[in-house]
Amino acid sequence: MSVAHDIDDNADIAAIMLHMGAAARAAGRALAQATSADKDAAITGGAARIRDRQADILAANAIDVAAAKEKNISGAMLDRLILDDKRLEAMARGLEEVAALPDPIGTVLDERTRPNGLKISRIRVPLGVIGVIYESRPNVTADAGGLCLKAGNAAILRGGSDTFHTSAVILECLQQGLAAAGLPETCLQAPPTTDRAAVGAMLAMSDYIDVIVPRGGKSLVERVQNEARMPVFAHLEGICHTYVHAKAQLDMARSIVLNAKMRRTGICGATETVLIDRSVAPDMLTPIVDDLVEAGCEVRGDAGAQGIDGRICAATAEDWDTEYLDSIVSVKLVDGVDGAIEHINQHGSNHTDAIVTDDDAVAAQFLDGVDSGIVMHNTSTQFADGGEFGMGAEIGISTGRLHARGPVGAEQLTTYKYVVRGAGQLRP
């Protein structure tokens, strides 16, 4: 197994990054001309190498996990970092699912013939070079790499120091898949350093990087949004809500809330606040709290919720604006769907919000009224994931309003150009 080594502290990181950017730009131009078969072969070849090198990846992951434990990181953050046989297989299978998707490049989005005979088509093309900056999740190396390749984009993948060794071996697997398919290995690259100066260099490389995608904590995303000289696909926080309406089935509400909060507490789609209709809270709140407490979740709530169940701790004003990423949830009683929509639009982060109800008219009001990238009816917010949306994987969740919103898959990593065909027409 080859283990990644950080570059010398005296190395000129800015120069290294500029060289990497130039290589990515050249590779991206070659990749944009590649056939669908070649791109898919590179992606599936990377998946095969991940399976072949399972022992190498797990050994590298053990190095990263040991270092993380020495830093006493939280259990939720450690869970993001740890790989096992099952997660590695899911990583490889995700790449194969991406390869099996239709190639978005070359899709004709619109075409028309003008009165003068000009034929105008709008055709999907790659964005170019994607920069991805992420923390804690080594699977992002595979997900982002595969999606960028599918959409014909080169990528510079800057994982966090906590995933340095694991991500390096996964990247080697993807590069081996590229080489076997006859494509430049520089289609996918990673800075050979954990120095944060590499991040600053990437954010300034507007000549080489077309879009930046940050995946990590609030401080990372804020830095990227503040400093990037190119467009950013990102969400700052995942303050997700599950609203239990008066006409919700209790058993369904219990199972959805428990799954939405506790399946994996450290993901951005985990519910952080549960809203319950005040009219049915005396009957519904305690069974829901029973499930959460039994699962090891701390429950914080407003005065109304505390008055019904004494196990609920007092929530502060900050709780409604907090992404816990841990076994903590806030609970608030609201006056109907209007109260739920008002709370979510004030305190949410435009990520993912769900309603549980048997009233389709109320559900439609909620889905129309909540201003989030993903809105759901009678299901868990933990489905906020590109793989679950049939995208094979995702490079991130975007809560912005321009270009991409919600899970960012291969299709969202494209733009378009107009192709105009004439027969000698001249403009009068």
Image (cartoon, rainbow, N blue to C red):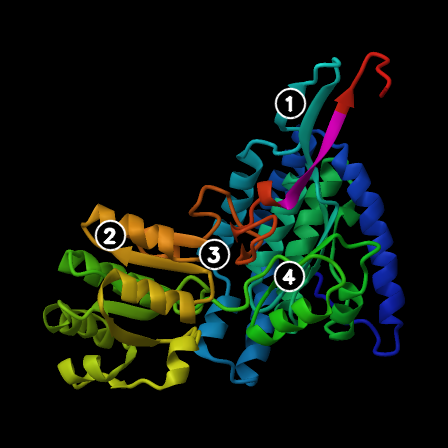
Pointers 2 and 1 in contact (CB under 8 A)?
no
Q: Main secondary structure of the magenta part?
A: strand
**Alpha carbon distance from label 2 to label 1:** 39 Å
Residue that label 3 marks: 87
Cβ–Cβ under 8 Å for marks 4 and 3: no
Q: Amino acid at mark 2?
A: Val
Q: Which residue is mark 1?
A: 111
Is 270 on the left or on the right of 287, as rendered? right
Residue farthest front in this picture = 428
Q: What amino acid does circle 4 point to? A: Ser
Q: Nearer the viewer, mark 2 or mark 4?
A: 2
Position of residue 151 relative to residue 348, above or below, is above
Magenta region: 413-419
The residue under label 4 is: 167
**Residue 261 position within the rendered picture, expressed as x and y whole percent measured from the top left:** 33, 67
Q: Which residue is mark 2?
A: 362
Amino acid, disc 1: Glu
Inter-mark Cα distance, 4 to 3? 14 Å
